[in-house]
Amino acid sequence: MENSLGCVWVPKLAFVLFGATLLSAHLQVTGFQIKAFTSLHFLSEPSDAITMRGGNVLLNCSAESDRGVPVITWKKDGIHLSLGMDERKQQLPNGSLLIQNILHSRHHKPDEGLYQCEASLGDSGYSERELYIDTVFLIVKDKGSVITVDDLSNPP
C-alpha cells in the first residue's frame, strides 16, 4: 500500500516490528539465575595406609574445578577434623593431610580410623556441591607386628 507521500505502508511488517518491541519489553526475567554445569574432579585421592606408632603418614587429596579452586575438607570417622586443635595434623596447600607422630597404644588409638577427603566449591557463589568422598582407613601397628592381607581387607 502506498500513501499520498509515496511511502509504502506494510501493516504486517509494522506489527512485527512494533510487536517485537513490546514482546521484548515484557520478556525481562527477574529472580532466575541460570547456573552452568561445573567440572569438579580429584587430581589425587587418598588410599589405605599403614604406619607405625610415632611415624608420619601423608593422605593425598587434591581437586580442581573450572569454577575456581575447590575447598578441601577432611573428616575422621564421619566428623569434620578441627585441624587447628591438633598440631600433629595439618592440611597442606594442595589439600593433602599430614599426620605426624602417630599415637597408638592398646587402649588409646586416636589416629586410627576412617578418613574422608571432601572437595566442594564452598562459598564461591554456587551452592556447595560434594563431588564425592574418598575414604581411607588408617591402621597403626606396633613395631615388629606382622601385617596380613586380612588386616587390610577387614579393618577393625
Image (cartoon, rainbow, N blue to C red):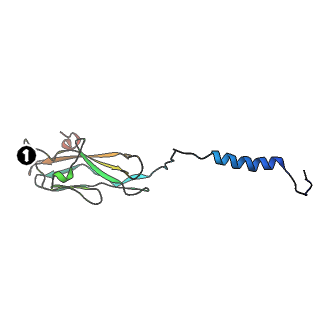
- Residue 82 percent location from the top left of the image: 21, 49
The kind of residue on which mark 1 rests is Ser
Q: Nearer the viewer, residue 61 or 119?
A: 119
Q: Which residue is mark 1?
A: 105
Q: Residues within 10 Å of mark 1 (few under 14, many from 20)?
A: few
Q: Which residue is drawn at the image coordinates 11% and 50% (left, top)?
A: 103
**Left or right, 124 with reference to 28:** left
Q: Quadrant of residue 69?
A: bottom left
Q: x, y percentage for residue 134?
A: 31, 46
In this picture, is 95 found above or below 30? below
Q: Residue lying farthest bottom?
A: 93
The kind of secondary structure element at disc 1 is: loop
Question: 112 and 75: which one is in front?
Answer: 75
Residue at the limit of the structure toward the right, as seen here? 4
Q: Nearer the viewer, residue 67 or 51?
A: 67
Residue 153: image location, x then y, percent: 23, 41
Q: In the shown orientation, is residue 18 left or right of residue 128?
A: right
